[in-house]
Image: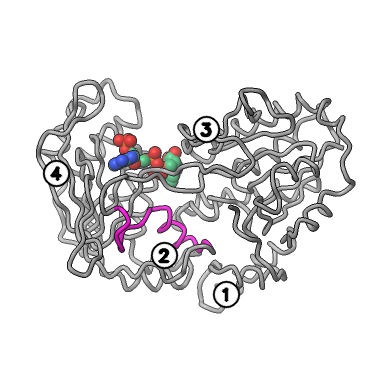
């Protein structure tokens, strides 16, 4: 039997497990899907915004895969000093790392770490009930919030800040975050891009949702949009960029309705510093005005702008982090690989594979991970005759337990789901997520959390 460990139960991990069990070349396959958290589904659970119910429902598809009897989910298992890549290779014929991009990119400007300035990924973790994020981290006492970056994560966090809390009550957002959002004093949200509207990374469906928010006016400045040579002539643009510009043009012509909140979409502003107020907390973001440089990028034009901000969410992309014991390409922030085969000193390392963001970088939508995972699984299956030549202990679970793991298996996860449904019922809401380690482990019937990886 070919024994495979998949590290990470987000979309890339689950699609890898699916591809390995669907192929027919090696019929006898057993896949353990390990995750540091007691809950499966990665960014589908802890990244997709709570009000994106349709995307969240993908969890149902991932769940079906993990219910396959040839696949075993083992949460609460951390690859780290006690369970190294080398040790894993002693338990499995192959290990596929699907660990995503675990941190945020840095802005590298002065004041970036002032109190009140956070990565957007932390805000996402907070409203998604990630157990590593303190439930009371965001008090939302500021009137003005600046979101730096114009990708889909920026759109998510801007929308959650703007959306009336009553609408979020219908989602699985944790109680503490819901309370803070309901008491939020934020009236003005600025989402700021360093390049032009035709170069924004958000997709049109996500952009349009901002225009449909109840209680929020979307403010755009036509003179700023018009700095983009494609603002009036969209003919040469790719379809998404063309539609984005068309939506923004539509909004520029729309009168404001004097609603309680305003969402300002700003462009051609490059952040250069975050500045503090007398209390030492962030008070403003200083930007350099940019303009098209004629070659598809932008250049500073000499002007500056300052936007007041008691809350700053830096949403400039995710970044992969090195996993001790695995090679890492620091430039691309990925594990060097060829079609998913991990490369050590340029040569494929027998039995080690990657899929998802740690293989190709943090780009694409959830579905992009499926072909990516299939490619990796195909490489692994092609290597199977050589991998199977290695003798292994009977059940890798014994090895995991010997390494100090206290796994939460599928029934434990089902118990967490049941506890979250019961919590929702007790609050008169649908399922409400449990947001702390102890609560999750108690619900799962487990007792010990794994140490954090180095
Ligand atoms: P992203 O799409 O790469 O967007 C990053 C944004 O940050 C860009 O606007 C980028 O501008 C800007 N940026 C980067 N460095 C900057 C700097 N130093 N100063 C100012 N701005 C800077 O990243 P993301 O929004 O984190 O999304 C990650 C992936 O998840 C994407 O593939 C996204 O589509 C996906 N996602 C999808 C959904 C959905 O489908 N609903 C939701 C969330 C995330 P430049 O373009 O100028 O570099």
Of the pair 284 and 321, the residue shown nearer to us: 321
Q: Earlier in the sequence, mark 4 or mark 3?
A: 4
Marks 1/4: CA distance? 45 Å
x and y percentages locating residue 190 in the rendered image: 23, 52
Can residue 200 be seen here? no
Query: What residue span does the magenta drawing correspond to?
Result: 112-130
Q: Earlier in the sequence, mark 3 or mark 1?
A: 3
Q: In the image, what residue occupies the spot 63% across and 34% down?
A: 373
Q: Tell me how far mark 2 sits from mark 4, CA to CA.
A: 29 Å
User: Which of the two labelled residues, at mark 1 and mark 2, occupies the earlier sequence position?
Assistant: 2
98 vs 190, left or right, is right
Q: For ligand 1, tell me if the residue under mark 2 lies within 8 Å.
A: no
Front one among 24 and 216: 24
- Residue 132, image x, y percentages: 52, 62
Residue annotated with mark 1: 423
| Mark 4 lies on residue | 221
């Amino acid at each position: 039997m070919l024994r495979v460990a998949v590290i990470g139960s987000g979309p890339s991990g689950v699609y890898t497990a699916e591809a390995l069990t669907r192929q027919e070349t090696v019929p006898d396959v057993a896949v353990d899907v390990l995750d540091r958290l007691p809950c499966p589904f990665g960014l589908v659970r802890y990244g997709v915004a709570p009000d994106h119910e349709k995307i969240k429902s993908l969890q149902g598809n991932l769940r079906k895969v993990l219910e396959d009897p040839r696949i075993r989910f083992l949460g609460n298992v951390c690859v780290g000093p006690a369970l190294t890549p080398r040790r894993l290779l002693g338990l499995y014929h192959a290990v596929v790392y699907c660990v995503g991009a675990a941190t945020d990119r840095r802005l590298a400007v002065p004041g970036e770490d002032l109190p009140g300035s956070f990565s957007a990924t932390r805000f996402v973790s907070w409203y998604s009930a990630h157990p590593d994020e303190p439930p009371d981290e965001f008090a939302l006492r500021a009137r003005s919030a600046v979101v730096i970056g114009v990708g889909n994560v920026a759109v998510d966090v801007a929308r959650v800040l703007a959306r009336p809390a009553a609408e979020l009550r219908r989602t699985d957002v944790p109680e503490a975050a819901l309370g803070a959002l309901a008491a939020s004093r934020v009236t003005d949200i600025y989402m700021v891009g360093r390049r032009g509207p035709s170069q924004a990374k958000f997709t049109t469906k996500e952009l349009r949702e901002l225009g449909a928010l109840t209680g929020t006016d979307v403010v755009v400045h036509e003179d700023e949009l018009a700095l983009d040579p494609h603002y009036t002539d969209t003919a040469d643009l790719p379809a998404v960029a063309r539609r984005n510009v068309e939506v923004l043009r539509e909004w520029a012509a729309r009168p404001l309705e004097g609603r309680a909140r305003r969402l300002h979409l700003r462009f051609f502003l490059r952040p250069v510093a975050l500045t503090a107020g007398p209390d030492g907390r962030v008070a403003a973001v200083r930007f350099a005005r940019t303009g098209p440089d004629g070659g598809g990028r932008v250049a500073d034009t000499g002007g500056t702008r300052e936007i007041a901000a008691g809350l700053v969410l830096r949403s400039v992309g995710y970044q992969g982090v090195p996993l001790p014991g695995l090679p890492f390409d620091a430039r691309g922030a990925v594990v060097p690989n060829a079609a998913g085969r991990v490369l050590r000193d340029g040569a494929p390392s027998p039995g080690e594979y990657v899929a998802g963001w740690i293989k190709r970088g943090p780009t694409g939508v959830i579905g992009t991970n499926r072909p990516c995972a299939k490619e990796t699984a195909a490489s692994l299956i092609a290597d199977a005759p050589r991998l199977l030549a290695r003798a292994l202990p009977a059940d890798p679970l014994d090895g995991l337990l010997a390494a100090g793991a206290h796994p939460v298996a599928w029934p434990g996860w089902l118990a967490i789901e049941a506890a979250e449904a019961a919590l929702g019922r007790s609050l008169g809401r649908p399922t409400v997520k449990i947001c702390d380690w102890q609560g999750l482990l108690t619900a799962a019937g487990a007792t010990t959390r794994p140490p954090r990886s180095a």
